[in-house]
Every structure is written in C-alpha cells, then in structure tokens.
C-alpha cells in the first residue's frame, strides 16, 4: 500500500462538491455490474487502510461520505477527517480491481480539502508581494531582470534634452529611464493624489501652472509636471501642471470679519464727580 500523502489536489479537483459520488452512471456502460459491486463494497478496506497508515488509528476517521468513480476499474472512497487543524478535510482512498476480481486493492490514501476546509491563500512570488511603500531603511531592492523601464546608458532615452545633457557633462550612468519607464511614471503621477482628478484638485479652480510655488521639471516631463515648493501644500511632491489646491500663490486673503477696529479709548481723561 502506498504511504499517506497530503494534499492531493488532483483528487480534490475530481471530487464532487459534497464529497460524494461524482457521476455514478458515467462509466456504467464500460464497467460490469460485478466489478461495480466490488469497488463500491470496499468501504471497510478503505477505512482499514487509513487506520493502518495513521498516527491515531481509528480516532482520525470520521463519517463515510460516499464513493466516486475515476475510471472503469477504480473508485475513490471518502471519509471525514477527524484531526486537529484539519477541520473540513477528507480522507480519500483510491481502490482498484480488474474485471472478474472478487476483491479490490488499495492504490492510494490521501488527505484532501473538502468544500468547507480552511486553506492557505495562493502562494504569491516575492517580487509580486513587494508593494510601493514597503521599502524601509536598510532594505535592498534590485530592479527586476530585463526591466523594460530601464535602458543601457549608451542608448537614447527618447528625451532629447536629457540625452544632450548626459553627453555634455559625461554622467555615463550605467542605466537610464526608458521611454516606457517615463511614460509609466507620468501616468502614475497624473492618476495619483497630485493629479487633476484628485479630490483636492477638483475642489478648486486654480491650477499649478499659474502658481509661484510651482517648479517646472526639465525635459519632456516638464510639459506636464513640476514640483511643489509650498510647505503648506504638496511640498516636495511631483504635481501635474493642472493640479490645484487652496494654497495657490494667487489665493486672495479672507474678507475681514468681526467688529471694526477703533483707536483705543483712554478713560483717564474722564472727570469723576459725586452726585
């Protein structure tokens, strides 16, 4: 008999949602009646196989859930698993027999998740789990292999002003931002918290292009973006040229409210007399 293994995803996929018989008539035309009786009658054999390979014996085998046929000569018997930490899981025992046989043999004993089993979430590769904002002081994060956002330093970036500047001052950086990388960054900035569709921008009629605090970027990105230099607003952030906020440099002062201002009254000039 094969050893107990877990989990068997193939068996789980082929099982019916309630753990019972998947399609009792699927192979009836191919399977003789006596073979069907041998396969479906192997309940005690299947239970004994679980007990034999288990740690706690009969205590870990619960209610019988039924059988399903995988092919004309094999059937899977299922039992509820009674084990700490495996609530909703099932024992699946595959038995097989050939036409004319008077008994079945055990092919496999596996532990599979049932429809109510608590499963771990799908595994996500590490590079897909890292999100913006996850980088902490001391962390190292290399760019992905063959990152399409980067091009070798000797290639053109697609930004004429930047390419000319690189050559003049001889920066010679190993890699530069590619047109794709620049376009993706521009789209993020435009759709983000400092773009024209943000709640802040929609609440004002003034835009950054007319603001004294707006520092325009150089190169092709400068046609749409700049940096805010107002510490009371988006200080240090890249803002879209048509972003806006209530701290625009042309924002008028508020109207005067309250009591009017008068010169102080000197009550020392009063002469007091007794009446």
Image (tube, rainbow, N blue to C red):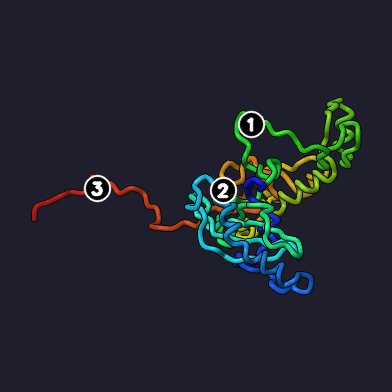
Q: In this view, does 81 lie to the left or right of 134?
A: left
Q: In this view, does 171 lie to the left or right of 13?
A: right
**Residue 34 higher or lower than 231, as above or below:** below
Q: Which of marks 2 and 1 is in front?
A: 2
For mark 2, give the secondary structure: helix
Q: Which of marks 3 and 1 is nearer the N terminus?
A: 1
For mark 3, give the secondary structure: helix
Q: In this view, does 259 lie to the left or right of 188?
A: left
Query: Could you tell me which residue is drawn at 66 percent across and 54 percent down?
Result: 106
Query: Could you tell me which residue is drawn at 72 percent across and 44 percent down?
Result: 226
Residue 71 seen in render: no
Quarter placement of the C terminus:
bottom left
User: What is the distance, in whole Å, between disc 2 and disc 3 at their CAs?
Assistant: 108 Å
Q: Nearer the viewer, mark 3 or mark 1?
A: 1
Q: Residue 267 carries which label?
A: 3
Q: Quadrant of residue 213?
A: top right
Name the residue tied to disc 2.
52
Whether tag 3 and tag 1 are in contact, CB under 8 A, the answer is: no
Q: Earlier in the sequence, mark 2 or mark 3?
A: 2
Q: Where is residue 217 shown, x and y percent of the image?
A: 76, 41
Q: Where is residue 254 shown, x and y percent of the image?
A: 51, 55
User: What is the distance, in whole Å, between disc 2 and disc 1 at their CAs?
Assistant: 50 Å
Query: Could you tell me which residue is drawn at 64 percent across and 66 percent down?
Result: 40
Q: Which of marks 2 and 3 is in front?
A: 2
Q: Which mark is residue 139?
A: 1
């Amino acid at each position: 008999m094969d050893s107990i293994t877990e989990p068997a995803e193939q068996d789980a996929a082929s099982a019916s949602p309630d753990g019972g018989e998947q399609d009792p008539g699927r192979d009836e035309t191919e399977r003789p009646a006596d073979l069907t009786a041998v396969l479906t009658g192997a309940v005690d054999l299947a239970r004994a196989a679980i007990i034999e390979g288990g740690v706690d014996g009969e205590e870990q085998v619960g209610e019988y859930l039924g059988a399903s046929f995988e092919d004309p000569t094999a059937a899977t018997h299922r039992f509820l698993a009674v084990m700490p930490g495996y609530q909703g899981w099932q024992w699946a025992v595959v038995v097989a027999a050939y036409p004319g046989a008077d008994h079945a043999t055990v092919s496999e004993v596996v532990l599979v998740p049932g429809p109510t089993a608590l499963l771990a979430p799908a595994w996500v590769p590490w590079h897909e789990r890292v999100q913006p904002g996850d980088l902490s002081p001391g962390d190292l994060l290399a760019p992905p292999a063959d990152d399409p956002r980067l091009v070798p330093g000797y290639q053109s970036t697609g930004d004429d002003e930047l390419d000319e500047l690189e050559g003049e001052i001889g920066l010679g950086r190993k890699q530069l931002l590619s047109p794709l990388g620049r376009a993706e960054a521009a789209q993020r900035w435009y759709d983000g918290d400092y773009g024209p569709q943000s709640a802040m921008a929609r609440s004002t009629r003034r835009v950054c292009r007319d603001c004294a605090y707006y520092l325009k970027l150089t190169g092709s990105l400068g046609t749409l973006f700049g940096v805010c230099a107002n510490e009371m607003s988006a200080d240090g952030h890249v803002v879209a040229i048509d972003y806006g906020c209530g701290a625009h440099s042309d924002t008028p002062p508020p109207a005067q409210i309250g009591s009017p201002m008068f010169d102080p009254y000197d009550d020392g000039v009063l002469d007091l007399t007794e009446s």
